[in-house]
Amino acid sequence: MTDTDVELPPDGYPGPDGLGRPGGLIPPPTLTGRFGICDVEPAVESGRRPAKATVGEILPFAATIFREGHDALGAEVVLVDPDGEEHRVRLHPVGGGLDRWEGSFRFTIEGDWTFTIRAWHDPADTWRHRATVKVPAGVDVDLELEEGARVLERVADDLPKDARHARELLHSSAEALRDTRRPGEARLAVALAPDVTELLTEHPLRDFPAESRGWPVRVERTRALYGSWYEMFPRSEGSRYDPPRSGTFASAAQRLPAIAEMGFDVVYLPPIHPIGRVNRKGRNNTLEPGPDDPGSPWAIGSAEGGHDAVHPDLGTLADFRQFVEAARDSDLEVALDLALQAAPDHPWVVEHPEWFTTRADGTVAYAENPPKKYQDIYPINFDNDPDGIYEEIVRVVRHWMAQGVRIFRVDNPHTKPLWVWDRLIGDINGTDPDVLFLAEAFTRPPMMRALGSVGFQQSYTYFTWRTAKWELVEYLQELAGPASNYMRPNFFVNTPDILHGFLQDGGPAAFAIRAVLGSMLSPTWGVYAGYELFEHVAVRPGSEEYLDSEKYQYRPRDWAAAAAHGHTLIPFITRLNQIRRDHRALQQLRNLRFHHVDDDSVIAFSKKDGDDLVITICTLDPHAVRETSVWLDMPALGRDWHDALYVTDEITGAEWEWHQQVYVRLDPQQHVAHIVRVHP
């Protein structure tokens, strides 16, 4: 074989063999066939893991696509669904000459999809650009128009057999281009008419087609992206202080209709298993429990059983199944806590001591997160008998799946090896793709990214600690942008562990503000019981722990009395959840756009899905009235800069005509936000 006989693969070129001569074939880093296709999105770990999407979600696609010279390119994304059917979406150039192409697609089928980016030389666009420059200038007029006629005839020949009218239109346009009796610009205008342009766009000529490698997308059920969560301790519902008495699954079930009426979709239960007695914590996390202190539900296991049992005070396994059924009757899903740890008297400690870490003094190491200590909990050591531990975890998860649980909130997943979650979620979703896992991981960004990448459908976030406008904007642009490919946020406004200082000091307005932000910024948000009653007292100044934390004691609440006195956020939360259900734009994440506000204590953002457009303007100051101007990014709303917007406030019903500049006045004692729908 001579130097000129080197055979090239579609994506290869000859390279030196180290001696200055053509030798082996070196695949170019960006070349795909004739053209460059790179920087493909969405992509997770360079395509080694699937990007995330859900049924009904609009997923943006993008790639950098370029070629030699100045001729025109065409591009599309080709998606293959789980049934093997192809779906094509045209890509369009954006970014003003940066060779970036974008498009979007709404998924309708669950399962594993793949997509490729396809590019081609577009003779029609190439000719149209050249002709619009040369013909008006009187350069090569007849030659350019003859070449255009041939392009139109090529397109006509490629049309489907039943496209008779379109074929006739293209042939008549070609004849007009050849009609030398008319001026060149008049002949060209025929070929540039809107109906001809539309045909050329819908039926492009595809010369030298090239296609990227395949990229994976996993499409899951809608609840993986959109939902409203409510956390409750079953033992507190129907409980008493004097004499001490635990609530039960039956008494907790009586609360479910009220939770559903507030518009929640998921009721999340902390661990419902037997609680250890060894090193049990007392009220407010003391080391000296009283005889009636129930202990922390996360200290799992005692003589009554372990992770596959229910606490006898709550009822039986049959009672739990009835609770799940009652939730289903109220259109609620039950999410159950999966905490892979054990109390010192858990059966695992006796049956499998190798699953735990023994210290130099012979004691078993308890959990610590300095300065916090959890003497009532033993963490699992996955380095000892990993297969045995994993088999037990799978058994436990499938046991609760058999009781009707399809969502698991995983406690502290970042303290367990990643291989556990990679394997577990893969195995469970391999047989039951509707089962969802939420990562309760308030940890470093790389670990949170890794947990999302290995399969967690949702994750807790830093939202609870983001209170300033710049923090919220910066964080949400990350979550709705690059991070959305691998992680879905769940914006809990509070948890049994997190009572932020903003809520401690801001009064009822602070609770309303955070509810607006959580529910409008994220398609999934959550509330821990007591939030609607403005519970805000910390155990000590500077602490985020609740006084008389429900983690260590019963906490009966008088819901009827709160409603009678009007000291409740329930009507407002109910309205927020209804707004979310009414607007599909609010059920998306990647469509979030921020708008400039002159006041740093007011934030403005919008979400758009087709004709459904919602704008939220919210104060971040729970203490003072804020008056300011909002400057709407009209193109981001799909409008021209000088358009008028006719809006209705979804909270108050007020109607206004807005323009690019909007004056707002927000009094936190009356209305903390405008949430408006924009009329088409």
Image (cartoon, rainbow, N blue to C red):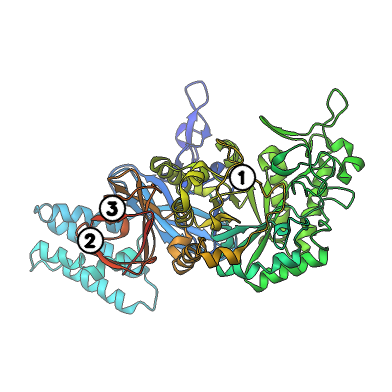
Of marks 1 and 2, the one in the foreground: 1
In the image, is residue 2 above or below residue 347?
above
User: Is the residue under label 3 in contact with that under label 2 (CB below 8 Å)?
Assistant: no
Q: Please report the residue visible at 56 percent of the width from the left and 70 percent of the height from the top.
A: 261
**Which amino acid is tagged 2?**
Gly
Is 390 left, or right, of 146 in this rendering?
A: right
**Which amino acid is tagged 3?**
Asp
**Residue ID for mark 1:** 546
Alpha carbon separation for disc pair 1 and 2: 75 Å
Instruction: In this rendered view, identify the residue nearer to me: 504 or 613.
Output: 504
Image location (x, y in percent) of residue 5: 48, 37
**Total count of labels:** 3
Image location (x, y in percent) of residue 621: 38, 47
Of marks 1 and 3, the one in the foreground: 1
Instruction: In this rendered view, identify the residue nearer to me: 215 or 622.
Output: 622
Image location (x, y in percent) of residue 520: 45, 57
Image location (x, y in percent) of residue 83: 60, 66
Label 3 Cα crowd, 10 Å radius (few <14 / some 14-19 / many 20+) = some
Label 2 Cα crowd, 10 Å radius (few <14 / some 14-19 / many 20+) = many
**Residue ID for mark 2:** 148
User: Is the residue under label 2 in contact with that under label 1 (CB below 8 Å)?
Assistant: no
Picture disc at residue 633: 3
Of marks 2 and 3, the one in the foreground: 3
On the question of residue 143 being in view, the answer is yes
In the image, is residue 471 above or below residue 304?
above
The quarter of the rendered structure image containing the C terminus is: bottom left
In the image, farthest residue toward the top: 19
**Which amino acid is tagged 1?**
Tyr
Q: Earlier in the sequence, mark 2 or mark 3?
A: 2
Alpha carbon separation for disc pair 2 and 3: 40 Å
Alpha carbon separation for disc pair 1 and 3: 41 Å
